[in-house]
Amino acid sequence: MTDAANVSARHVMAVIGGATAGSEIARILAGYGALVIVFEQNPRPYGKIEDGLPRWHVKQRHDEYEEINKRLDHPNIEYVPLTGMGRDIDFEELRTRWGVSGIVLTNGAWKDRPLPIDGSDQYIDRGLVYQNKLIYWWNHYPEKSYDGPRYELPAGALVVGGGLASIDVVKVVQIEYALAGLKARGIQGDMLELEREGIEPVLNKQGLKYADLGIAPCRLYYRRRVIDMPLSDIPAGTPDKRADALRQARVKIVDKAQRKFLFEFHELRAPGKVIAENGAMVGLNFNRTEVTGSQVKTVEEGVEDAPAKLTISSIGSIPQPIPGIPQKGETYIYADQKVGLLMEGATAVFAAGNVLTGKGNIKDSLESGTEIGMRVAEAYLGLSNEKLNLAEGARKDAAASAEKIAGAMSVRPKLAPEAIASLLRRVRERQRAVGYEGNFRAWLAKVTPADLQ
């Protein structure tokens, strides 16, 4: 904890979000001598590593947790947990009244992109659930202290999507189906074993096949072709023959995922209408599409009814709008996108990570590009034994952003000691309000459930 009585002139930076990008940027700015205040909306600073990645990534998650912890446990960093922009602190008040030198938004992309059917959101939690809420529930429901929403996963659930995250969702559903089928037979299943070995091999050990469970599989619907699935980037300028080979590699990845986790895949289908009964969504009616170049168009409406007691929308995540930040569509408007500068003024506002890219897919935090991207996608989906570093790409991008921000801030005047002392009094007030006593490691021990320690 910084001593307010012994401060010297320096920059004071507010970083919004303490996960991979936020902690890396905070560490670098602190290393340049800035006082960095990290505002984190949750008790723990792990973001989508904790709440967006399915919990089978056990070792990788905990490795990244400790890396984040090391970066934030720094004498020049003040941690302010349980503090969300717009929820607990008004962004405009932070920008115009707190007196910080700059603000860096690294609060990620947590807002689900809406299911593209007018009126569909009236069915949320009545037959429709979005990916981020579902994965959060699935990651935390085994914890004794969990008191959030709970979801049932009825047989034959629909998933609308097409990227890595949507395959995560179908894996969650299929693994839960298998666990339920085993439990009905008095057998205690193991989630990690099912994810590692695949559903059929684990059932075979018990003398069972998936068909014996009597549970209709999850169905994934995608508006493009399997060769278009964004499992890995194909950079512009890649020779046609190589690009075609990489697209065919996507087909192999999806085929391997289907064989391992036994879900159905339907391409060239876009949701057109909600099927509703008694105020609940009970399925979707799909249109047939075709892909020409990069464009998708509907070529026939109403070709397929897909009944389902549960539909999961997994078509991407976008940054939450923040009052005061200019925005066009799903992304913020930048004064200078090269350095991630959103707003000039006495307090400069920057963005980094998924806020800057406007994307929330985990793949955008992984190494990507041609063959490497394909191998990473396979490792991420549990289809190979290759070692996976979940946050390497995000850390590299964050480090580059931090250096640019540090350079932009170096020409700005430092805050006087009395201004810093006043600002620190605000920080202490907020920390006390949430029960944080200034010791980062002690706080983590306090807010981590006993069954996760």
Image: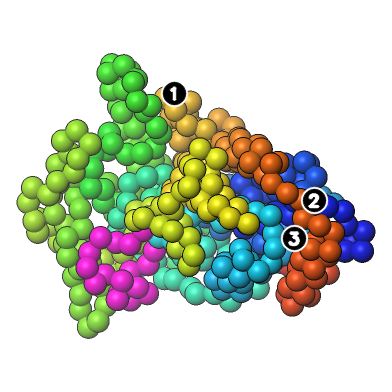
Residue closest to the eye, 41 or 245:
41
Of residue 425 and residue 88, the one placed in the foreground of this image is 425
Q: Which residue is the site of mark 3?
A: 79
> Which amino acid does the dot numbered 3 rest on?
Tyr
| Label whose residue precedes the other's in the sequence (2 or 1) | 2
- Quick check: is 433 in the magenta stretch? no
Circle on res. 10: 2
User: For numbered disc 2, what is the local secondary structure?
Assistant: loop
The span from disc 1 to disc 3 (Cα, nearest Å) is: 39 Å
- The part of the chain drawn in magenta is 113-131
Query: Does label 1 or label 3 sit earlier along the sequence?
Result: 3
Q: Confirm whether the magenta stretch covers residue 119.
A: yes
Q: Nearer the viewer, mark 1 or mark 3?
A: 3
The image shows residue 77, relative to residue 411, as above or below, that is below
Does residue 220 appear in the picture of this structure?
A: yes
> Which quadrant would residue 159 be assigned to in this image?
bottom left
* Place of residue 167 in the rendered image (x, y in percent of width and height, measured from the top left): 39, 47
Q: Amino acid at mark 1?
A: Glu
Q: CA distance from mark 2 to mark 1?
A: 45 Å
Q: Residues within 10 Å of mark 1 (few under 14, many from 20)?
A: some
